[in-house]
Structures are given as C-alpha cells and as structure tokens.
Image: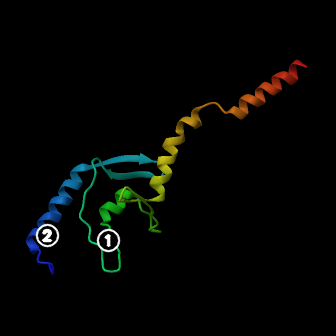
Amino acid sequence: MEEGIQERTASRQYNDWRRDYEYQKVQHTTGNGVHEAPAAPLHLHLQIGADGRILIPAEMRRAMRIDESGRLNAELVDGELRLFSPAVALEKLQTLFAPLREAPSLVDELLAERRAEAARE
C-alpha cells in the first residue's frame, strides 16, 4: 500500500492466486506420507527486503516441503536462484539412482562366481 498499490487490487490478486493454486494442487505420496504439490509451475512476485530477505508464502513452503528447520539448498544457474529443500533433493537423488538399486549387484555376482570356482576345485 505504501508503494501506491490499491488495497482492493492487492487483495484481488492474492485471492486470484490462491484460487488458482488450490485448483492446481495434486497429491502425491512419498516415504514420509502425503504431500501436496502444485501440478503446474507456481509463479509469484516476491519482494526482497532491505536486508536481502525474501518471505516465502506458507503455501509455497508446503509445496517445497520445507521442514521446521527451515533449511534450504540454493544454487545459481544462468542468473536464476533455485531454492529446494533437503527432502526434495533426496527424493530427486533416489529417483535418479533407482535403476541402479534394481540392477544386480556386481559384488554379489563376483562372490557367486568365486564360490562356484571354489566348489569345482
């Protein structure tokens, strides 16, 4: 309001955003239970305070699965600041390495070959 934004306009924009966000929500299950995440990218205009702090709305924090510690990982890629919670990072890594878990263990194969050789001797 101090910057000349009319109260009704700000309220309307927030209500429109909230309505759209609620329609976009989907539920997915992870090892920790059910979490809600937006089905489509969520775009907001956030304000940076004089001290460099950014306030992340509660709905967005929930979608990012930020826990009570409030810890985030951050990376700067091509001029974009990307913030993600350790829970999201872990889930991405587990998804990335899932095919390796399903593959047969090379150690187990080697041990089986050695045992077969020892049995033949």
Q: Amino acid at mark 1?
A: Leu
Q: Residue furthest front?
A: 78
Residue under numbered circle 2: 10
6, above or below 86, in the image: below
- Of residues 18 and 6, the one nearer the viewer is 6
Residue beneath label 1, please?
55
SS state under label 2: helix
Q: Single out the residue that lies furthest toward the right.
A: 121
The residues tagged by marks 2 and 1 sit, at their Cα atoms, a distance apart of 16 Å
Residue type beneath disc 2: Ala
Drawn side of residue 109 relative to residue 85, left or right = right
Q: On the rendered image, what quadrant is the C terminus found in?
A: top right
**Quadrant of the snapshot with the N terminus:** bottom left
Q: Residue 11: name its quadrant.
A: bottom left
* In this picture, residue 81 sits left or right of residue 96: left
Q: Is residue 32 left or right of residue 54?
A: right
Q: Between residues 6 and 32, which one lies in front from this camera angle?
A: 6
Q: Residues within 10 Å of mark 1 (few under 14, many from 20)?
A: few
Coordinates of residue 8 in the picture (x, y in percent): 8, 71
